[in-house]
Amino acid sequence: LIMLAFGGTAAVMLGMATVASTIKRDISGWGKFLFVGLLLLIVAGVANIFLQVPALMLTMMVLAIALFSAYLLFDLHRIIHGGETNYISATLAVYLDLYNIFANLLSLLGIFGGSRD
């Protein structure tokens, strides 16, 4: 299960790195929209603590994978095209994107692919 999540995360990383290095469109304006999406995801997570809706939790996991994949594309594009000059914060941003993709993918695989002993 962990290796499957690792493989999925690696595939997302490879895909986003390929897109970030070949894309001609300027995606530097995505930052505001991605941040709003992150805030909405946090609000939905806090609401789900009280509501305990399983469908909302699954939806949040899928949206988190999509959101952090877009964040990964955004961060890699900034690194490749010179928008980010502080390499420590750039490395931390990519690490956090990958961690969040891995954690949410592992949770999804655990729910849908876990053994039912």
Image (cartoon, helix red, strand yellow):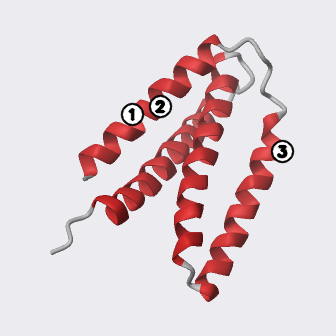
Which quadrant, please, contains the C terminus?
Answer: bottom left
Q: Are marks 2 and 1 in contact (CB under 8 Å)?
A: yes
In the picture of the structure, the residue carrying the numbered disc 2 is 13
Residue in the foreground of this view, choosing between 104 and 62: 62
Q: Are marks 2 and 3 in contact (CB under 8 Å)?
A: no
- Residue depicted at 79% across the width and 36% down the height: 30
Q: Quadrant of residue 103?
A: bottom left
Q: Secondary structure at mark 2?
A: helix
Q: Secondary structure at mark 1?
A: helix
Q: Which mark is residue 81?
A: none
Task: Find residue 75 and report its horizontal and vertical position in percent.
Answer: 65, 32
Q: How many marks?
A: 3
Task: Compute the Cα span from label 3 to label 1.
Answer: 26 Å
Task: Find residue 87 and report its horizontal and vertical position in percent.
Answer: 60, 30
Residue in the foreground of this view, choosing between 91 and 51: 51
- In the picture as drawn, the residue positioned furthest to the bottom comes out as 50
Task: Compute the Cα span from label 2 to label 1.
Answer: 5 Å
Amino acid type shown at disc 1: Ala
Looking at the image, residue 18 sits to the left or right of residue 71; the answer is left
Q: Which mark is residue 32?
A: 3
Task: Compute the Cα span from label 2 to label 3.
Answer: 22 Å
Q: Which mark is residue 10?
A: 1
- Residue depicted at 46% across the width and 56% down the height: 104
Q: Give the mark nearest the N terminus, 2 or 3.
A: 2
Q: Quadrant of residue 91?
A: top right
Looking at the image, residue 102 sits to the left or right of residue 70; the answer is left
Vertical position of residue 103 compared to residue 27: above or below: below
